[in-house]
Amino acid sequence: MDTRPPTSKPNDEEKIESESELDPSEFEDDDDDEFRPLRQKETRKPTAKSHESKVTPLNTKKRRAAKRASKAPKTIPNTVFQKETDVINIQLKKHVSRIEKLEKVYNVLKKHKTM
């Protein structure tokens, strides 16, 4: 005879009862409305060939210069102002000489009129 105590194997009915005792809300996800795709393994992007990835020193210098220029305050160099003032001075001299000539003509006409 068997001296071991009988092991109780649950019947199918007992399994169903034990499962029904569990609360199904414990297993529900809060984000049921959102569709969350399964994560896939990230594929490795093809790397650039060695000659394509190299940056020439000239390009580096240009990039750095452009970066400095973009960070620099937007000021107009003095040479631009100097050129503009030179042009204005020349125009003023022309106008002054015309005015002097007109004054001379006016004075001559005034003298003739008074005579």
Image (cartoon, helix red, strand yellow):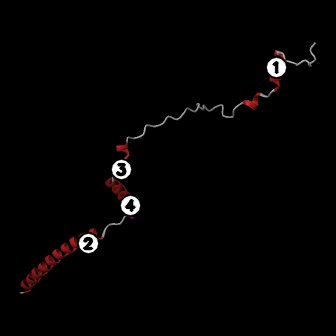
Query: Looking at the rendering, which quadrant does residue 101 occupy?
Result: bottom left
Pointer 4: what residue?
Answer: 68
Q: Position of residue 73 (x, y in %)?
A: 39, 64
Residue 92 in the magenta stretch? The answer is no
Location of residue 34 with respect to 53 vertically, above or below: above
Left of 84 or right of it: where is 72? right
Among numbered discs 3 and 4, the one appearing first in the sequence: 3
The amino acid beneath tag 3 is: Val
Task: State the residue in front, 57 or 38.
Answer: 57
CA distance for labels 4 and 2:
25 Å
Mark 1 closeness class: few <14, some 14–19, many ≥20 residues within 10 Å: few
Q: Position of residue 40 (x, y in %)?
A: 55, 32
Determine whether label 3 and label 4 are within 8 Å by CB: no
What label does residue 15 carry, if any? Answer: 1
The amino acid beneath tag 4 is: Arg
Mark 3 closeness class: few <14, some 14–19, many ≥20 residues within 10 Å: few
CA distance for labels 3 and 4:
19 Å
The amino acid beneath tag 1 is: Lys
Determine whether label 1 and label 4 are within 8 Å by CB: no
Query: Looking at the rendering, which quadrant does residue 77 occupy?
Result: bottom left
Task: State the residue in front, 44 or 62.
Answer: 44
What label does residue 55 carry, if any? Answer: 3
Residue found at x 66% / y 34%:
31
- For the record, the magenta segment spans 69-73
